[in-house]
Image (tube, grey):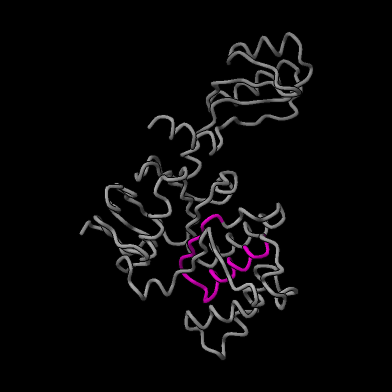
Amino acid sequence: MPTVSTDAAIDVAHLAKRYGDVDAVSDVTLRVERGAIFGFLGPNGAGKTTCVKLLLGLASPTAGGGTVLGRPLGDRAARARIGYLPELFRYHDWMTAREELDFHAGLIGIERSERDRAIDDVLETIGLSERADRRIGTYSKGMQQRVGLGVALLGSPDLIVLDEPTSALDPIGRIDVREILRSLKARGATVFLNSHLLGEVELLCDRVAIVDRGRIAAAGPTQELVGVARGVRLKASPAGVPLHSILTRYGIPRDDGDWIVVDAMTRDDVPQLVRDLVAAGIALHAIEPLTATLEERFMEVLQTR
């Protein structure tokens, strides 16, 4: 058994899963601290779903091992403290949202005396209190996804594993889910987020891992993975000869609409640039760092493997 820690929410080493001649997961070592929002990314067929199954105890590893919530993979006590929203969920169309939540509350062992309050709290959290007594079959896909999120939140789990939790939601719904996930983090829960919406991951996640061909291709704090500023863009006036003369000392500017972009500027150069512009009588209206997006970094990682 690989050496792992019990103080992390997830700590696995050299996980592998083979189905016949296919290596669905080849070698995954991963640590997720408690109280973090962790993004798990990868292209289709990269091994993400198999990894999640291994973490949840829905499949047994061919090799490697580790802990989830301080207990060995598949441990029943740990599984009782995990909430899970699968990407392909399906609930009882003939039930209302309240009935569905009551059904799942019974499955996870919430006492009858506590169940109504727990369900009301979840319905309020997911924004379905006023529509809780309508049949799920009449719900939009986005509303059904909210029900799935509610099921995952029942019982105040310590670890919430979410597979594409915002894929069917409109922009307001995505904002709502962001706030829900941040509130979970605030109460000390850990969120393991698998999503193709990289903008959402970049906004929410403390750390990110990119999996490809059954292995971790890159991992680290989100901002470090995206990278430091590679330049600046600025708005200044008047945009005449003095401005361009100054900018040529720091890089070759190019026009980007109302903005002027200066590539390859280091963080240490920025204060001096600002001083030079102000000294020349040039009014600065805005100056912003240029960084890669998570989507750009994601593509770079996959293209170099």
Q: Is residue 215 magenta?
A: no
The foreground one among 104 and 154 is 104
Q: Quadrant of residue 295?
A: top right
Q: Is residue 211 left or right of residue 222?
A: left
The foreground one among 139 and 51 is 139
Magenta stretch bounds = 142-164
The image shows residue 8, relative to residue 277, as above or below, that is: below
Residue at 55% over, 32% down: 292
Q: Is residue 163 magenta?
A: yes
Q: Position of residue 39 (x, y in %)?
A: 48, 50
Q: Is residue 84 left or right of residue 91?
A: left
For the C terminus, give its image quadrant: top left
- Residue that sits furthest to the right in the current view: 238
Q: Quadrant of residue 130?
A: bottom right
For the N terminus, give its image quadrant: bottom left
The image shows residue 231, relative to residue 6, as above or below, that is: above
Count every numbered label the image shows and give the total.
0
Residue at 47% over, 45% down: 44
- Residue that sits furthest to the left in the current view: 1
Q: Position of residue 46 (x, y in %)?
A: 41, 45
The image shows residue 196, relative to residue 254, as above or below, that is: below
